[in-house]
């Protein structure tokens, strides 16, 4: 698993890890059942605190994207469509926020769509 972290971003590192794993799942780079690095191993590779990786893994597990199996490791879950749906929802919310901001500048929805085309 290749995770790249931008330490200069304001976005927390754990969120960057979550997004990277989601992206790799969505793109099919991480297939269901694929074992991913342990918390300590990934923390060591990235040069970060293991608690940061643990927080990212907890979020991924809550979202059903990874599964931790006691004494066996952590694996990509079977529900890849969930990763896609989460990403689509996130992007739709970003578009909605941008639309609201543009409307605050006095543009109508029709004008926004026209400019986007």
Image (tube, helix red, strand yellow):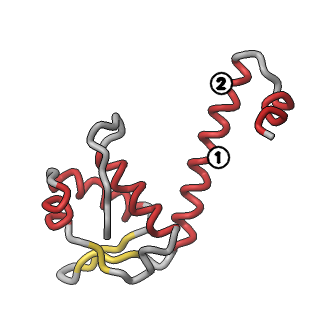
- Residue at image location 70% in from the left, 31% down from the top: 99
The disc, 2 or 1, on the residue closer to the chain's N-terminal end is 1
CA neighbours of label 1 inside 10 A, class few (<14), some (14 to 19), many (20+): few
Residue 14 image position (x, y, % from top left) = 30, 49
Is 98 placed left or right of 103 in the picture? left
Q: Quadrant of residue 107?
A: top right
Is 67 placed left or right of 37 in the picture? right
Label 1 sits on a secondary structure element that is helix
- Residue at image location 38% in from the left, 56% down from the top: 18
Q: Quadrant of the C terminus?
A: top right
Residue 59 image position (x, y, % from top left) = 36, 56
Q: Which of the two residues, 22 or 66, is positioned nearer the viewer here?
A: 22
Mark number displayed over residue 101: 2
Q: Which residue is mark 1?
A: 92
Is 83 placed left or right of 36 in the picture? right
Q: Quadrant of the N terminus?
A: bottom left
């Amino acid at each position: 698993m290749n995770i790249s972290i931008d330490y200069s971003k304001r976005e927390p590192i754990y969120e960057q890890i979550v997004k990277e794993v989601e992206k790799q799942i969505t793109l099919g780079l991480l297939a269901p059942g694929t074992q991913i690095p342990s918390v300590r191993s990934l923390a060591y590779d990235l040069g970060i605190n293991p608690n940061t990786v643990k927080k990212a893994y907890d979020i991924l597990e809550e979202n059903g994207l990874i599964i931790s199996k006691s004494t066996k490791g952590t694996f990509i879950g079977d529900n890849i469509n969930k990763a896609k749906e989460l990403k689509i929802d996130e992007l739709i919310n970003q578009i909605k926020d941008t639309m609201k901001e543009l409307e605050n500048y006095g543009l109508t929805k029709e004008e926004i769509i026209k400019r986007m085309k």
